[in-house]
Amino acid sequence: MSVMAGPRMDGRAIAAALDIGSNTVHLLVGWLNGGAVEPLDDAAELVGLGEDVYAADGNGFISPARLDRAAETVARLAARARQQGAETVLLVATAAVRDAANADELAAAVRERGGLDLAIISGEREAALTYRGAVAGQDPHAVSGAVQVCDVGGGSTEVIRAEAGRIVLETSLQLGSSRLSRPYTSDPPGRDELARTRETVTRALAALPPYQPALLAVTGGTAAALIHVAGSAERRYTMGADELHRVADLVYGQSAAEIAAHHEVDAGRARLLPAGVTIVDAIREGAGVGELVLTEAGLRHGLLLEYLERRA
């Protein structure tokens, strides 16, 4: 963490959260507004650490090139946050860095390049922060009952269940869009490949205790990309089963380049969407619900909420 004096928005502190994920480095700069984070800046840059860590023929190491790119990206985004008045830049890493054989080298590189201490958080800590960020700003009535939040990342999927605002289950599943895309041999992947992905996801979800939430929310890069494929510019979007299946058919029927060109999705993210939408639909089916909320709010929002509420 790097702390420095910064301006305040209407007397309220501005802070930033950086998240090194399996696919992307995300930045959120914001301030506290009515129990939720009001974004001042929200950016993401594809780095693809999961490409190295989860390579079928690899050894779990982040390559020197990707390590350098990640450190440079973190340093540049941290500087951008400070220029916007962030008094604190919080830096965390999730699944790919947790699993990397040389995570210590990345921590040293971001400390040298950006002056930041990297916190490699557990799957359970990631789940708790994600839940907090995803439900902030939601209709209080909607989150007063049974809620399930799932963060579909590149290396893992965090599942959080809550009753009346109290978390009753937090778990991290080894289901991520990057991890599950590794075996694909074609673009778009073939029917048999997608069927194997669905079987893998369904089997992992079936190991969890049965649960039918009143509200199902999905966050992460996959959720944000699916909002774009659906043609929406909203940060939070409710999608029914029929629309989700229509979006899945679009994703399954197009190459990554076509998805990127037609739906304003980064090409690297587009390549991971077949696995990602398969995970999302399996989650919806397993929960037994007809619709879900796709939201861009998650880990970084929860991290900033935690800091800013202590700061207030």
Image (cartoon, rainbow, N blue to C red):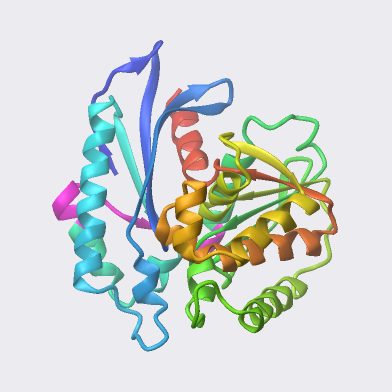
Position of residue 223 measured from the top left corner of the image (x, y, whole percent): 59, 51
The reply, left or right, for residue 92 in relation to residue 193 is left
Q: Is residue 116 visible?
A: no
Position of residue 159 measured from the top left corner of the image (x, y, whole percent): 65, 59
- Give the quarter of the image for residue 48: bottom left
Position of residue 91 measured from the top left corner of the image (x, y, whole percent): 34, 48
Residue depicted at 46% across the width and 22% down the height: 312
Q: How many marks?
A: 0
The reply, left or right, for residue 187 in relation to residue 113 is right
Where 166 sits versus 247, above or below? above
Q: Does 74 lie within the magenta span? A: no
Q: Residue furthest left?
A: 112
Residue depicted at 42% across the width and 53% down the height: 266
Residue depicted at 48% across the width and 59% down the height: 258
Question: What's the magenta region?
Answer: 110-124
- The quadrant in which the N terminus is found is top left
Where 65 sits versus 114, above or below? below
**For this rendering, which residue is in front, 52 or 298?**
52
